[in-house]
Image (cartoon, rainbow, N blue to C red):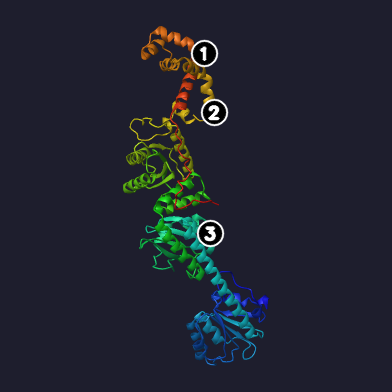
Amino acid sequence: MSENRQPGPAGRPPTVGDVLALPVLAGGDPRVVAGEEHLDRPVRWVHITELTDPASFLKGGELVLTTGMPLPDDWAGVRRYVDELAAVGAAALVMELVRRYHRPPDALVRACRARGLPLVTLARDVNFLEVTQVVHTLILGHQADAMRRTQRVHEAFTALTLRGAGPEEVLRAAAEMSGRTVVLENLVHRALACEPSGTTAQAALTDWERRSRTTPATDRPGVSGPEGWLAAPVEYQGERWGRVVMLPRALPAALPGRDFGPEDVTVLERTAMALTIARLTRPTPWERTAHRNALRDLVEQRHRSPADARARVAALGLPAEHVRLVAVLADLPPERDGEATEFRLSEELTATGVPALVGLLSPGRLGVLLALRPARPWREAVERVARAALDAAPGARVSVGAPAGDLADVARSFREAARVAEATEPGRPLPAGRSFHERADIGLRRLLYALRDDPRVQDYAERRLGPVLDHDARHGTDLVATLRGYLDAAGNKTVAARSAGLSRETVYQRLRTIERLLGGDLESGEQRTELHAALHAVDALRAPPVAPPPIGTGPGTDEFSPGPRS
């Protein structure tokens, strides 16, 4: 009999269609003559009857087996017979065409079609007791499997909670268990985290706010809205904070919600509970960490596709099309609280109505992505951001990359801002009329400062100026200062002597010593240029060490761990 024990898909009870495919019934040559569209009804039990009123013994979900012997002869009796089966929720009526009937009565077919009750005829004799035994074994086996799966769900979410898992890890577990896309949103319908399953973030999140607003909130896990979302509330300190949503696998063609089973509800309930506990135990608002992860994904280009990236940032409330996108970095002084600065800057931008993502990219580096109307002067908006950052963290260095016309170019804009930051030594005065630095500010001196750790720059400085530096170190002289004054005066010895407060003869003597040590001619414009560059390199090498963290490195306390992106 093992050949008859073929369950339906894991995670749901057998349906009418599953049962009809079992060999024990397939041998009777079953034919569906009514209610074909309802073969997905779950079968809770099998009931053999030869009564004229079998519905009084049913509770719903039964597969009713009959030889047709008790079927009334009159049309009204047949209709009453079918109405009672449909009203009690019978899964289907299976009638054997061997003894009383050899074709299904027209009245029975019409009544079943009218009530949407599947009617299945068997052309050959079937052992109903064997059908009952096989299907009941299948149902009981499914129930035992369901209990074991439910236990595994509870154990998995308990382990996540005890481990202090963040929202993305909880959502990832829910998506893996259910095989469905799971989304976490707050009260203003911002999708803070999305774990796609069998689809893309673009398909799940496109036009998210509008779709979410058409899906009413529920006090407990339930299906609602035109798309048939399964949703559960997430609370914080006894108040509703947001909700977690499980999306159906297919478009809701006819019956939204029929796509979900009891195990999906269990998974979503435990997901909501785990998120509620995580929200209580984590101090950082999840909106902040959602912004951080969105920015890091853009900077490191971890999205599956540009369309996914657009859908994710749009679901966070940032326009991604028909805008000018500007990347801003603020490197904070070591003593400043990065999270406090992040919060204050975010509040400032929200209050002024500037759409932006604001988040710590690393412990000492704050990233901002502005979405501006193409006609709006972007430097004006960046100046506002820079002033707000300097007010929140005096001593911060604000750098900006060139505006990007598309989200795909944002990573380039952030890289450019990072290069500007690398070329800006601490304490460098701000450009006139500005509170930020940009690429146009980088001259030779700042370029060499940015390249100061490159061995080739170090080797060049040593080759060109090493003998003079060594002489000053051994003899206590100050030839480098004399050379600097001479080069700053564009080779005018008189101006150099006046600036240094020395006699011309002293300057001449020192310059001859420098020429002897370097084996060169200081009257050569090319050599003066080379020495000037070498002096800038020496200045850069002597500058205080600054090591801003990489823009893709996190502070280690994120609520949403970015994790690998497939």
In the shown orientation, is residue 198 left or right of residue 166? right
Q: Work out whether 116 lies above or below 545.
A: below
The numbered dot on residue 517 is: 1
Q: Quadrant of residue 445?
A: top left
What residue appears at the point 50 percent right and 44 percent down from the top-left corner? 300
Of badges 1 and 3, the one in the foreground is 1
Instruction: Give the side of residue 102 with respect to residue 546, left or right.
Output: right
* Mark 3–mark 2 distance (CA, rounded to whole Å): 48 Å
Q: Nearer the viewer, residue 260 or 404?
A: 260
Q: Residues within 10 Å of mark 2 (few under 14, many from 20)?
A: few
Q: Identify which amino acid the numbered label 2 is placed on.
A: Pro
Residue pointed to by mark 2:
455
Earlier along the polypeptide chain: callout 1 or callout 3? Answer: 3
Alpha carbon distance from label 1 to label 2: 23 Å
The answer to whether the residues at label 1 and label 2 have Cβ atoms under 8 Å apart is: no
Decide: few, some or many residues near mark 3? Use Cα within 10 Å; few <14, some 14-19, many ≥20.
some
Residue 237 at x, y percent in the picture: 36, 61
- Mark 1, other Cα within 10 Å: few <14 / some 14–19 / many ≥20: some
The residue lying at 31 percent from left, 48 percent from top is: 351
Amino acid type at mark 3: Ser
Report x, y in % for residue 182: 48, 60
